[in-house]
Image: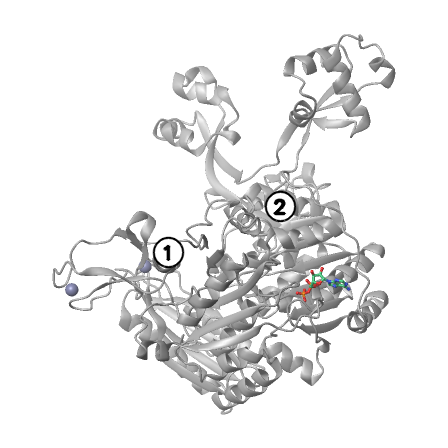
Amino acid sequence: MIASVIVDVPAKQIDRTFDYKVPEALTSVVQRGIRVIVPFGPRKIQGFILSLKEESSVKKLKSIEEVVDIEPVLNEELMSLSEWLTDQTLCYRISALQVMLPAAMKAKYNKFFHLIEEKQHLPSHIKELFEKESPLTWKTADAHHVLKDLQELIRHRKVEMKYVVKQSANVKKARFVELADEKLMNEIPGNAKKQQLVSDHLLKNARKMAVTDLKEATGATSAVIKTMIDKGYLIESFNELYRDPFQERTFEKTEHFKLTDDQKTAIAPILEKVNSYEQQTFLLHGVTGSGKTEIYLQTIDQVLKQKRQAIMLVPEISLTPQMVQRFKGRFGDQVAVMHSGLSVGEKYDEWRKIHRGEVNVVVGARSAIFAPFKKLGVIIIDEEHETSYKQEDSPRYHARDVAIERSNRHGCPVILGSATPSLESFARAKKGNYQLLELEYRMNQQDLPEVKIIDMREELREGNRSMFSRDLLEEIEKRIEKKEQIVLFLNRRGYSSFIMCRDCGTVMQCPHCEVSLTYHRSKESMKCHYCGHEEHVPEKCPECESEHIRYFGTGTQKVEEELFKLMPHVKTIRMDVDTTSKKGSHEKLLSAFDRGEADVLLGTQMIAKGLDFPNITLVGVLSADTMLHLPDFRASEKTFQLLTQVSGRAGRHDKPGEVIIQTYTPEHFSIELAKTQNYEWFYQKEMMMRKTAQYPPFYYISLITLSHENVNKAAGVCNEIADILKSRLSDQSIILGPVASPIARIQDKYRYQCIIKYKHEPELKTLLKKILDQYSDTGKDAVTIHIDVQPYIMM
Ligand code: ADP
Ligand code: ZN
Ligand code: ZN
């Protein structure tokens, strides 16, 4: 038997399968979709079996060394989905497989050592290491310590070097006990109170429990439990234990709401497709608070009744405790949660619950779209316009496309939900490719909050140089008197504080990238957000030696300081990358705000969504324009979406809300229209602009980026590629470039790009594949090429 294996290393030259013999002993366990260890050059590495066959055209075949899995980690559907993904995004096949699995299953290759000679010949420090534990569990540091000596031994063939496949997270095991025969329990002497307690607890609850949990629940000591084991009352075992990210929390059970007539009208066609096992993409358009989530919940309920499963995607930043509460509250233990805040081990465990069919719903960020469910009944993408659904690294996929592809394979509907759908989706709904469902009113019958636009130029003319307009300050004061709460929102992108010399105007830049460094107050340092370079704030300007060097821009810290200066009695909670980097801090800050420990919640994007606190009656947007001026054809769309989103945070419950938007360009249509939150008008207007400028959804775009340390080389290759494109594509297509990328240098590499705009180019993908092949040389001095077939961020 021969296995075709793809090895777990993304690289151009090995972007294909290799044949291996299957040793006799392994023939019964090998199958498509399992991981194996194979010899590869001088190394042993991990790979996936893609197929099995009788013969190979290769003469001298090596053999598979070991199998890692007993059953496939990727089922048939996901295996073939990976083919589709490879083709769609032009990625390596192995990258398409890797993206579907939790990071914990990606092997880290370390060398490890296998003993073949008598241990007696070994120096004692190495012998010790071998005796301590199996080389498989050696810590890299330990191995490193003796590496030199070991290499010597390897040369003399006393020790053989072998592979190490080190999983970054292993299955967690724990000591469990369970009740032996119940009759035995009656033998426990009446005065052994603790033992009695333990047995009662086990009888009443799960008969089998992790010892740590049991000790905590009953107060029994290790000695008590040991005695009970010794006497045969308890049986001891070591079992897998899931790491539960929500261990500390209980979720109150919640019931379905009786749907309103509007909700009923919207859910009916969805349920119809659920019941008939048919694919259909729905676009559920409704303002925040219009009851979309309740529709998702009740659709999922129907899917579960059919013994099928559901994927619910939400943007990373809105995976708040409140969101999780709604799903866990409704569906309890059936729900797995997947997001980047979990540890590698926790993610692995959540994935295994799905893989083993122990849960039927996953609520997660982008990558949860690959959840290995076998019978999908619905896929939901909430806030479908969010850019975080597009992965920026290879494979550069959009979760929406994957959702539709999977739903075709499973025969189930997809629901895209949003108050401000992406232009692409709304256009498809208008054309009838998606079915449009509308929810027009907020559940609480509250009108949308009143939105006031403040012209900051006017403020300046009146002599107000602060970042707070007089209106905003006045309104904040009013809320504080009424003991109501305020959210202040600052756009993070393009809005961090930078360091500038006041005398010569020099802005501190990253030495490796064409971007200014961001000031971090807590460490008095400046950091590059592209490459991570960090340095202390200089005391003198490196150009003119002036000491008048200070930070500019309006970072959250600066806003906090200014607010404190203006209104020292106001209590503020600040939420940004700095205050939420620790695990769980996000949740802590929010619940403190919920308990009323602060008047103002000040933050970035992070606070724009998901928040649902009854006491928030004022939302202030400090500067609405920051995003408008980014080099991005979606700038207006993103601004409108964000302003609408943020405004939705006010007055979600009984108290009416108000929104104040400060701006330097009040006449811009995306700001004007955010006032009335009229999506339809915005859509019409923006579609006209896109049509004129020849952008999506009228044209498709693809982006090719070349980077190299030598600027001429990057530009030169880019030029060559532009020429190829121009000669091969039709006259209807537009090729922009070569031009320097908006961020012209990252990590010392200059970046050039070509943008292709096209309506219909059936041969484009083949051509791009060829270009990729021709130019992705891996030599030391080679230019790096990236192709993004449908880019979201045009850097
Ligand atoms: P959206 O997802 O559009 O923001 P939600 O589903 O969160 O809207 O609904 C807004 C609020 O109204 C929530 O507090 C929710 O619990 C409540 N709600 C939703 N549907 C109903 C209903 N049919 N009856 C009563 N309350 C409802
Ligand atoms: Zn200077
Ligand atoms: Zn940098």
Quarter where residue 519 is shown: bottom left
What colour scheme has been applied to the protein in the rendered image? one colour
Q: What SS does tag 1 mark?
A: helix
Mark 2 crowd level (few <14, some 14–19, many ≥20, 10 Å Cα):
many
Q: What SS does tag 2 mark?
A: strand
User: For disc 2, does the CB lie below 8 Å from ligand 3?
Assistant: no
Relative to residue 292, is residue 4 drawn left or right?
left
Q: CA distance from mark 2 to mark 1?
A: 57 Å
Q: Is residue 795 visible?
A: no
Q: Is residue 679 visible?
A: yes
Q: Residue at x 33, y 68 (%)?
A: 466
Amino acid on which the number 1 mark rests in the picture = Phe
Q: Earlier in the sequence, mark 2 or mark 1?
A: 2
In the displayed orientation, state which residue is furthest to the right. Answer: 183
Q: Residue at x 53, y 39 (%)?
A: 165
Which dot marks residue 564?
1
Location of ligand 2 given as a quarter of the image: bottom left
In the displayed orientation, state which residue is furthest to the front. Answer: 481
In the displayed orientation, state which residue is furthest to the left. Answer: 545
Relative to residue 51, is residue 450 drawn left or right?
left
Q: In x, y percent, where is residue 623? A: 42, 71
Amino acid on which the number 2 mark rests in the picture = Arg
Q: In x, y percent, where is residue 301? A: 80, 57
Q: Which quadrant of the figure contains the C terminus?
A: bottom left
Q: Residue at x 79, y 27 (%)?
A: 207
Question: Front-most of 531 and 710?
Answer: 531
The nearer-to-camera label among 2 and 1 is: 1
Quarter where residue 51 is shown: bottom right
Relative to residue 393, is residue 389 drawn left or right?
right
Which dot marks residue 35?
2
Q: In x, y percent, where is residue 669? A: 49, 84
